[in-house]
Structures are given as C-alpha cells and as structure tokens.
Image: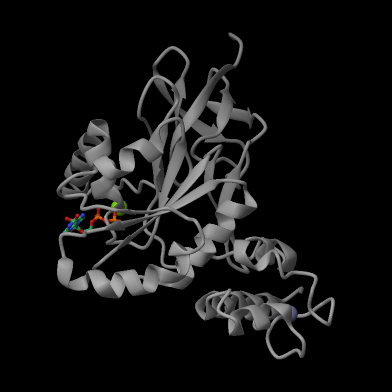
Amino acid sequence: MSAPQSGTIIAAFGRHYDVAMADGSTRTGYPRGKRSAYACGDEVTLSDDGQLLGHSERRSLLHRSDAFREKLLAANATQLIVVVATEPSFSDELISRALIAAENQGLRALIVLNKTDLTDALPAAYAVLAPFAGLGYPIVELSAHTSIAPLQTFLVGQVSILVGQSGMGKSTLTNALVPAAAAATREISAALDTGKHTTTCTRLYRLDAAGSALIDSPGLQEFGLAHLGRDEIAAGFIEFQPYIGHCRYRDCRHQHEPDCAIKSAVAQGKIHPRRLQHFAALMDQLAARPNY
Ligand SMILES: Nc1nc2c(ncn2[C@@H]2O[C@H](COP(=O)(O)OP(=O)(O)O)[C@@H](O)[C@H]2O)c(=O)[nH]1
Ligand SMILES: [Mg+2]
Ligand SMILES: [Zn+2]
C-alpha cells in the first residue's frame, strides 16, 4: 500500500466524488459510512482503494437545509454569485437567503442579472433588485448568450459558486466561461439519451492556474437556512446591524413589538420593507422548528 494522496473534490454526485489529484489525474472517491460529509471544493485525502479518509479544515462551508436534512453546497468557496434573470421571474427572498448564507461564511457576494437581451422584462427585474442595489452588493448585468465579459473581472482570484433558481442561466454562464464545462454538458446529455444515470450535483471548474475557480450548482427553488439561529440570520442582514441592540426589548423579533429600532428604520426609509419581510419569514420558519 502506498501513502494516501491528497486532492480536491471537483464533482459531488450522490454517493461518490470526482477528486482532482496533484498529478493531474482524476480519481473517484467514496466516503466511508453512509452519510456523505464531503462537498465540492473539499481538499481530501484518498486511500489507494478510493476511500475518502478526511478533508482538511474548511475556510468556508456553504450549505442549505430544511428541518429534515442538510445539503452541503461547496467548501472553500470565497464568493457567492446569485444568478437571476429578466425571465422567468425570480424570488427576491431567495436572494436574501443566499446573501445571509454568504455573510455567515464570510464570502463576498454579488448578483448577476442575466438575459438583459430580453429588454421588455428589464424594468420589472430592476424593481425587484432595488432593495439589494442600495446595500453595496454589486449587480452585474449581462446576457450570457452575448457576452460574459462584465462578470470576468469579478472572478479573478476567487472561488465562486453560482447559485439560483433553475432557468436563470447558470449553466449557460458556466459553459461560456469554461470551455471544458460545455464538453461536460454535452457528455451528460449524451449519457441521458442512452438512458444512463448521470445526476451531477455540483461541479468545480478551474479558471486559471492561479486558483480562480467556478462552481456550478444545480438549480434550487429553496435556500433553507435551518442550520442558522436567530442571531446568525439577523447578522446576515447587513443593513440591520447599526440598529440591532437598540430595540426596547432585548429579544425583539422586529415584528409587532413597540419601540423597535428596525421598524423605525424601515419607516424612515433606511431599511427596505421587503428586507424586513424576508427577515420575518425566516423568523416564522425558525419559530415553527420542532426543537426551537
Ligand atoms: N434570452 C436569453 N436566454 C438565455 C440567456 N442565458 C441563458 N438563457 C436560456 O435560459 C434557459 C436556462 O438556461 P440554463 O443555463 O440551463 O439555466 P440554469 O438552470 O440556471 O442552469 C436556456 O434555455 C438558455 O438558453 C441569455 O442571456 N438570454
Ligand atoms: Mg443548470
Ligand atoms: Zn426590534
């Protein structure tokens, strides 16, 4: 037996992983035990016979969860990119949730508004994005069919994960940014045609030799944050921070309590009402949790 080798997980499937090894080869890794505790982006050690022996300490870990299960999205990402589009319509609550997850893990965050070629739908998209535009999150407008140039400078030196509802154009963006991704997509559709099962979860693509990388994740309709507590959720609303601790009640939920600093800030136009609605929805979910 030779010594275990180290590598990086570049694709996470249900029960196995693709691991890019230092020598440039790709090997398949299998977790020990039933529960998969690895994510795309994890730096792992692999035994001779393909067992995953562990991962190094994560600089970040993105996951989403509901009351019943938790799903790891990516390890060691440095930037989260929420992809929305002029069409179909998208959920601004999902944007807030993704941003909270990013803030919680200390990731940079930005929003891509894709499909700007569909100009009729632009005003509506701008209106939905307005609450985020004022918060300092960059909003990069582009048409993935035409040019991905506006996004490129944001990717340099970052390990970026694309998240968003399906149909927003994440895969189109990835294919435009990474020629190898386009090839993988073709392989997958070919495999699907022949009836083979190829459920890709999340995939990491290297963008350059300096370590910039892009992670494409499958579309998500929900971004559950059941693994975060009340204070962690509140901390994810960056514009709330100056007001936190200034409500009359220490345990203020910022809903119906008197002398609420957050509600006052909303009334004064300093916090967008949609953002307080998103916060309230998260608090309701938290309260409905079995063991809260
Ligand atoms: N008009 C237009 N359509 C686009 C653009 N980018 C992607 N699409 C289309 O949107 C659909 C969903 O794209 P896809 O990349 O599969 O979205 P994903 O589910 O987020 O990965 C596809 O039919 C794409 O061709 C764009 O810039 N303009
Ligand atoms: Mg896709
Ligand atoms: Zn309050």
Q: Is residue 160 left or right of 46 when viewed as pictured?
A: left
Residue at 77% from the left image edge and 87% from the top image edge: 259
Please state the total of marks drawn on the protein image.
0
From the viewer's side, name the closer residue of 251 and 73.
251
Q: Quadrant of the N terminus?
A: top right
Residue at the front extreme? 268
- Quarter of the image for residue 258 reads bottom right
> Residue 149: percent from the left, percent from the top?
25, 40
Q: Residue at point 56% right, 23% down?
A: 46
Residue displayed at 30% across by 48% down: 197
- Say how the picture is coloured: one colour
Work out whether residue 196 can be spotted.
Answer: no
Going 27% across and 46% down the picture, which residue do you hit? 173
Q: Work out whether 267 lies above or below 234.
A: below
- What is the x, y in percent for residue 244? 74, 69
Quadrant of the rendered image containing residue 155: top left
Q: Is residue 283 above or below residue 230?
A: below
Q: Is residue 231 left or right of residue 240?
A: right
Q: Is residue 22 above or below residue 100?
A: above
Question: Considering only vertical position in the picture, is 58 above or below 3?
Answer: below
Quadrant in which the C terminus is drawn: bottom right
User: Hey, which quadrant is residue 263 in on the image?
Assistant: bottom right
Q: Nearer the viewer, residue 174 or 81?
A: 81
